[in-house]
Amino acid sequence: METRAGSRLLIYIVGGVAVSEMRAAYEVTRATDGKWEVLFGSSHILTPTRFLDDLKMLDQKPEDISLP
């Protein structure tokens, strides 16, 4: 079992997270020499295609949307 002395910051984003945001969290962990560990969670990872698909759904009625 690994023990940690630093703090953990847990971030969960509903609606998708971009790869650049995950990278920023990784860089914070590295820049603080492990004093902070940033953990990321999300409902899904956004790609350019997925982002555009999400934008298209904004003008639809909720009952007309098919969920993956």
Image (cartoon, rainbow, N blue to C red):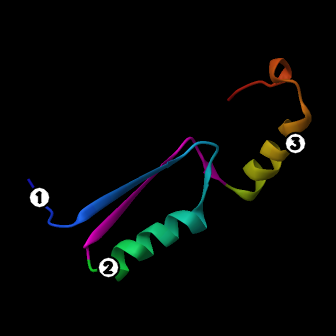
Q: Is residue 15 left or right of residue 66?
A: left
Determine whether label 1 and label 2 are within 8 Å by CB: no
Amino acid at the residue labelled 3: Lys
Determine whether label 2 and label 3 are within 8 Å by CB: no
Instruction: Name the image quarter holding the C terminus.
Output: top right
For the point 87% across and 42% down, which residue is it?
56
Q: Is residue 37 magenta?
A: yes
- Most foreground residue, 68 or 23: 23
Q: Which residue is mark 1?
A: 2
Secondary structure category for the residue under label 3: helix
Q: Residue furthest top?
A: 63
Q: Is residue 23 left or right of residue 53?
A: left
Magenta residues span: 34-46
Q: Earlier in the sequence, mark 2 or mark 3?
A: 2
Secondary structure category for the residue under label 2: loop
Q: Which residue is mark 2?
A: 32
Q: Which residue is mark 3?
A: 56
| Gap in angstroms between the C-alphas marked 2 and 3 | 39 Å
Q: Is residue 38 magenta?
A: yes
Secondary structure category for the residue under label 1: loop
Q: Residue furthest right?
A: 59
